[in-house]
Amino acid sequence: MPAERKKILWADDEIEMLKPHILFLEERGYEVKAVTNGDDAVSLVREEPFEVVLLDEMMPGKDGLSTLIEIKNLNPQLPVVMITKSEEERLMDEAIGLSIEDYLTKPVNPSQILLVLKKIIESKALARERLSRDYLSELKEIALLLDLPPDWGDWMAIYLKLSQWAVELDRYPDLGLKQTLEDQWAECNRRFGRFIEQNYPGWLRSREDGPPLSVDVVSKFLVPHLARGRHVLFLVIDCLRLDQWLAIEPLFYDYFQVQRDYYYSILPSATPYARNAIFSGLFPGEIESEYPDIWARGEMDESSSNRYERQLLDRQLSKSGLSLKPGAKYVKVLDVEEAYYTERHLANYFHLPLVSMVFNFVDILTHSRSSSGVLKEMIPNEAAYRSVIRSWFVHSPLFQILKAFSEQDAVVVVTTDHGSIRGLKGARVLADRETSTSLRYKYGRNLKCDPKQAILITDPAQYKLPRMGINTTYLLAKENYYFVYPTQYHHYLNLYKDTFQHGGVSLEEMILPVITLTSKKL
């Protein structure tokens, strides 16, 4: 079967003189539609698909730049090559600003045109071939790491590779590799659950043997900058996954030098536990001893259990020997009005040694999707989730805040308290009425679940968790399981399926980025 001919549109008022060029291209497998004016070019773009448009800049009537604008309005992704007799720099700048793919000066020869077309059209196919080849090579590397078996550093590397490929494949949705990646990811999470079950308690007994945890974020990534007298913005974006960060990271390259590190969330990987651990430098069991009001039964929601974050951070910094003058500012942004208010009053913070901000948009989006059919349709999967978060961030006050800090002599440390995972499999759990309601972790008495689906913690002290009374036990869901009670099992199984949850044991929830941003302008 002959290869499909690539369709080219060529608009030039002297097209009759270019017939040898057109024949040259047709002999090499291109189908060329030729027109002599801009109006006909726009009409054809409206009616037919083309791979590339070759556009003369100087045509009677509608000139090349006006035609370019109309073509881009019809199809912003259609590559356009501008051809002109003029070498005027202003004209080139204007055309490039209108997103042309390339620029040629007359007289052009057939080989020049062929080279440009190959670069534009065949580079896409070559990129896809390279991507498929590199992806299969990476899969083999991950498989080799899984056979070692991997340590905590290897798991960071594995999760980074998976996340990078997820973001890369978003650009090539028709490549047919998404399912392979999902299968590999699921196998990695299955093994990661076993790894955490076997190793996490040991990390708590001997801190030197384990990775940085939530309790280490401030001391490891924040305190050194403050000790050197640097002004610091400490930003915690609640519930942000590594792959979601990778989707927005390129937006920072024009403003900051970007250094990416990683840490593990403590368990449960949920806001009341993980974010309090960040701000306090203490494990939840230790917080229970020092601040028992935080862990009072029935108060395990963010508005209550995370209400002491500013005080916890102040005490942690004081224990580190830091005395910040003229003081520090703590801001929690729960809605868009607070975000715009913070942006408007940002100048009041620049002189402070430390500004801490918590932004809850991603977490709110996660929870809202569970109950909104519209959001579920907008965000059917992880790729769409990344896209929505990037779109939000580009237009958000938060991006404006960060750009403003890029103009200051300050260091920006960005992190998150936990990630989330898309729950796809139900895990039947037995519990009494007093058991907590979360879908990825539970605490209460007499908890039971299949050990392949969850980690049962009968001794909270082993995991440095609050006891919250006598005989309290914990369940932590593995892989992409979510807990469902036997009563009306199928109803709740379907109700909570395909919702993003957190609090359990998975790569997405536990391995998290810490980003250090330093301004390029200073």
Image: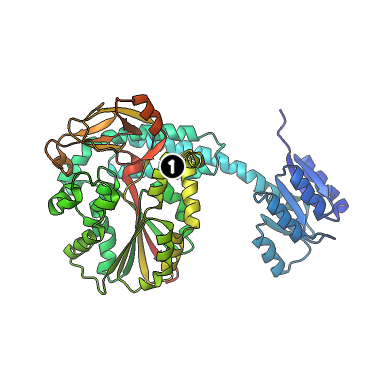
How did the renderer colour the structure?
rainbow
The C terminus - image quarter: bottom left
Q: Nearer the viewer, residue 13 or 327?
A: 327
Residue 313 horizontal/vertical position (percent): 23, 60
Q: Name the residue carrying label 1.
A: 369
At horizontal 56% and vertical 39% (from top left) the residue drawn is 129
Which residue in the rendered view is the most extreme toward the right? 16
Does dot 1 land on a helix, a strand or a loop?
A: helix
Residue 9 horizontal/vertical position (percent): 77, 47
The 10 Å Cα crowd at callout 1, few under 14, some 14 to 19, many 20 or more, is some
Residue 436 horizontal/vertical position (percent): 25, 38
Q: Is residue 116 left or right of residue 330?
A: right
Q: Nearer the viewer, residue 176 or 75?
A: 75
Q: Nearer the viewer, residue 284 or 6?
A: 284
Q: Is residue 443 left or right of residue 481?
A: left
Number of marks drawn: 1
Q: Is residue 387 above or below residue 487?
A: below
Q: Is residue 105 visible?
A: no
Q: Hey, which quadrant is residue 352 in on the image?
A: bottom left
Q: Is residue 44 above or below residue 346?
A: above
Q: Hey, which quadrant is residue 472 in on the image?
A: top left
Residue 75 horizontal/vertical position (percent): 68, 49
At horizontal 86% and vertical 55% (from top left) the residue drawn is 14
Q: Is residue 136 above or below residue 114?
A: above
Q: Is residue 521 visible?
A: yes
The N terminus - image quarter: top right
Looking at numbered disc 1 in the image, what kind of residue is underneath it? Arg
